[in-house]
Image (cartoon, rainbow, N blue to C red):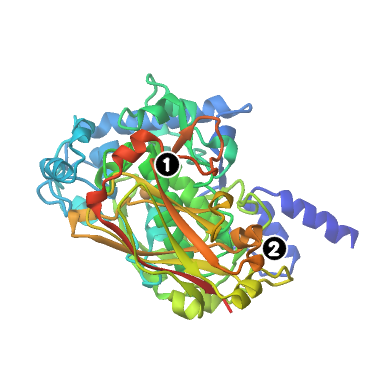
Amino acid sequence: MKIKTLRNIVCAVSATYLLSMACVRMEGAPPPIVHPVKRVQLRLKWQDFISGPGGPARLASLKKAVLKMKSLDTASPTSVDFRRSWKYWANIHGYYGPQSMDGTVAEQLSYLQSVGLGSDASFYNGITDQTPPDQIAQAVWATCQHSANAGSGQANFFGWHRMYLYYFERVLRWAAQDNTLRLPYWDYTNTSQEKMPAEFRDTASTMFDDKRNSGINAATSALNSNSTNINSALTNSNYLSFEYGIETGLHGYVHCTVGPTCPVAHMGDVPVAANDPVFYEHHANIDRIWACWQHLYPTTARAPWQTQTFSFPDENGNLQTRPVSDFLNTATLGYVYDNVSACSRRVIKRPVFHAEFALQTRTAEQRLPTVVGTSKPLSISSPQASVDIPVPATKAHALAVPGAAPPNSVLVLRDVQADSPPGTMLDVYVAKQGEPNNRQFVGTINWFAAFHHHHGPSVRTLEFDISEQLRVLHLASTTAGLTVSFEATDGRVAANAGAATSHTAVRPEVAQAFRKEANVKVGAIELRQSR
Ligand SMILES: [Cu+2]
């Protein structure tokens, strides 16, 4: 018993692959296959990466790698060196040019003009059209994957980006001549880390990018700690729904908030987003959040999306094509995150988990069969709008009963539509009908990647787990129902202001940025339950 307790403590604090493998072996699993080439190293949170005895050397190594990659931007376009350049790796995510699905820079500028964002044209200064110089570039440029819709079954947003970072990191190690180098991550889910890390704001640093919101770059503005909260998201045991929720939620929110807005260069615009150095620390955090989910819901079950293959050049410029299934266990890729067991701001009560169910397509209708209430369609033609969801008192009571296994309550925003970029994001709140000041934050709607390729209007169905919010609201005492409200936001709060939930007026510059011509509509808002 004592040995077991000691082993649990060791396993709980163990950070390295080998130590955790020892823990597995003590539990009777077969001996691990030790990878012959790579040593497993930690991907650290940014604040740890730069501090401690090894911090200065790690930071110097990362900056050396970025500088080296940037120096190769002018290498001969068909050379191996160009495949190791900063520009090339940004182009793998996306690019503008005559052969690009997204068209040319000039076409993007006229698009911005046509949707009322012409004043942001200056963010495209210095951005030029690119042309894939050879077959390898033809195969790998602009291949980033974004999900079609919740439950569509074939997403691979997580899978493609994990592969991308893995090969990018190999090039970083080559460029730094440092085999221990691993990407750090910007953990903005931690409320003390909502400001852009200082190194990225230092105008003298190679990590700086002037194509960001000026307040973010000055650290007078910060991310909103409401929008970066993944407590509710992590209670979602359905993989495809979780992936879609993180992609269209937190991930896009950070892109649009660093911005300067969506769809504007760099971070706010898919085809050029990966030119900003902070893109990689942002996506390392998104990759970590996937690892958090994998830790919460471990499974060896297989699903069709895992068999999809993607191609990337390695650090020698050779094309590698591998299935997503090779990338499910990060330890086999040479890295583990320093923290995948405490990714939430509170302890997650893990819901019932059926692996074969969780990895397969499940629509909201299948996963959440009980409709508790439905709103009328809503047109959002001003920076603040709201709609009521009638909820019969008997159902409301059942929703909010505190018990050992409370049902999951999910708000489904069906067919969230816009004809063009709305100019702002929208914060979503829920309150008891008639008590608007006691509202609870639900999530932030953003339009990152929504108008990708400029193809017509955007339509997305979004889901938010609001079980916790309903408990806080003591919904059982209501007889009227819920009010769901929408409020325009640029995603930013004054630095050190923390989370702003009180019912205040939308800031004037945000209200002005909101474009009612975008014609934002929500088809219906449903409150659904898991049983
Ligand atoms: Cu992204």
Q: Which residue is at a point 45% across and 32% down the rendered structure image?
A: 62
Q: Is residue 190 above or below residue 518?
A: above
Left or right, 463 with reference to 77: right
Q: Which residue is mark 2?
A: 24
* Quarter containing the C terminus: bottom right
Q: Is residue 126 above or below residue 481?
A: above
Left or right, 365 with reference to 474: left
The local crowd at label 1, few if under 14, some if 14 to 19, many if 20 or more residues have their Cα within 10 Å, is many
Could one spot residue 381 in this view of the protein?
A: yes
Spot occupied by residue 244 in the image (x, y as percentages of width and height): 42, 62
**Residue type at tag 1:** Gly
Q: Quadrant of the rendered structure where residue 42 is?
A: top right
Name the foreground residue: 291 vs 115. Answer: 115
Q: Which residue is at a point 78% across and 57% down the rendered structure image?
A: 8
Q: Is residue 287 above or below residue 72?
A: below
Q: Which residue is at a point 23% across and 39% down the rendered structure image?
A: 82
Name the foreground residue: 77 vs 364. Answer: 364
Q: Is residue 85 above or below residue 353?
A: above
Instruction: Quote the CA–CA distance across marks 2 and 1.
Output: 42 Å
Q: Which residue is mark 1?
A: 491
The local crowd at label 2, few if under 14, some if 14 to 19, many if 20 or more residues have their Cα within 10 Å, is some
Spot occupied by residue 153 in the image (x, y as percentages of width and height): 38, 73
Tell which circle, 2 or 1, labels the residue nearer the N-terminal end.
2
**Residue type at tag 2:** Val
Q: Secondary structure at mark 1?
A: loop
Name the foreground residue: 410 vs 357. Answer: 410
Q: Which residue is at a point 44% across and 37% down the rendered structure image?
A: 492
Q: Secondary structure at mark 2?
A: helix
Could one spot residue 332 in this view of the protein?
A: no
Q: Tell me: is circle 1 under 8 Å from ligand 1.
A: no
Spot occupied by residue 263 in the image (x, y as percentages of width and height): 27, 45
Of marks 2 and 1, the one in the foreground: 1
